[in-house]
Image (cartoon, rainbow, N blue to C red):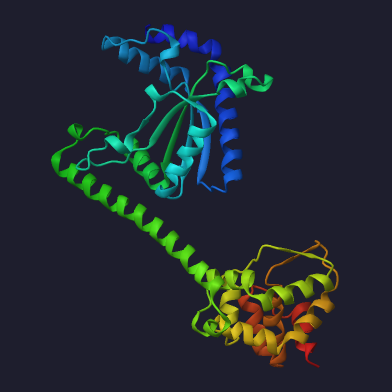
Amino acid sequence: MKGKELRDEFEKVQGSYTSFSKKIESIITDFLASEGLVVHSIGGRCKTLDSLELKAQKRYEKNIPYLSLDEVTDLAGVRIITHFSSDLDKVADLVEREFEVDVENSVDKREYQDPEKFGYASIHYVVGFDSSRLLFPEYSKYAGLKVEVQIRSILQHAWAEIEHDIGYKADIEIPKDIRRKFSRLSGLLELADQEFVSIRTDLVKYAKEVRESPEYKLNGIAIDKTSLVNFILSNEYVLSLDAQICDIMASRNCDPSFDAGELQALEYLGLKTLGDVLMKLKENRELVLRRARDIGVSNSGQVCAGACVAYMMQVIAASSKDENFIKGFLKLLDLSEDGIFFKYLSNFSK
């Protein structure tokens, strides 16, 4: 078929493929969420009439024409971009499990990449709904349709987009000296991809160590967001004090929320380790509970986990009885230095 002929055929069913790509995107999004897999982005699209006509015409002129529209496997597409290369196989396993894969037209390009050539490869699947899903009316209209699912990491995607923008894809098209630059850049991006995976692994290991640390080791753990959050979610004393606060405020716990300003405020108050935090919580327990009673019932019905740490910070600042010190504390939290809360903290210890 010539390009124009194939275009005319596709124009009749383009709407179905557009709907199909969005349906696949929605299903994959739901399954990723149920599996707890967080990706950078996922998006579906349908091939444009112009791009299909151009692709088909080039094949026709090379004497390898499409014989029918069914031979075109990328009429609809879904692209999944992961944060880490280590997540590619997890997403691939999900796609293989939930859809019927056209093995002949699917390829893991990582397996065929020449290590001496620059560039990144992604995983390409051509999939459709299996017979069990097609039994449902909302899916039956997509019988016989296929979509191309691409899976790549964010750095692989960056490479592909820049390469596409430059307009060169094969090393034979590029002068030798520029090809060397591409090769160096490819190695750097591959190393960066591996290092990001390593950093994530190290952070998971660090979080586990914090959660499992006995009390006597807390003096050796510096305060950062990872250590503080995992301490809040695992330390029995913190959990007990937070539970009391929830009872007082007729609320339930939600996820902890500590930003850079609050971490700076802890240091401003002289707290440098998790051991310091635990010691100050114990010393100021009654004042922390008093602070909760002053607030009363939570309007939202929720109190962030670690509320006891936040209230402990406030009562330590208030206990200084130094207005300039309290203002410095509020400034780090991006709060008004002369508003109602400042007056409350200034009078808290009186």
Q: Residue at x 72, y 93 (%)?
A: 321
Residue lying at the far left of the rendered structure:
176
Residue 89: image x %, image y %? 43, 42
Residue 5: image x %, image y %? 42, 6
Q: Quadrant of the N terminus?
A: top left
- Residue 309 visible (yes or no): no
Q: Residue at x 60, y 86 (%)?
A: 269
Q: Quadrant of residue 289?
A: bottom right
Q: Quadrant of residue 331?
A: bottom right
Residue 107: image x %, image y %? 36, 30
Q: Is residue 2 left or right of residue 346?
A: left
Q: Residue at x 54, y 10 (%)?
A: 12
Q: Is residue 165 above or below residue 236?
A: above
Q: Quadrant of residue 168?
A: top left
Q: Is residue 205 above or below residue 268?
A: above
Q: Quadrant of the C terminus?
A: bottom right
Q: Is residue 266 above or below residue 80?
A: below
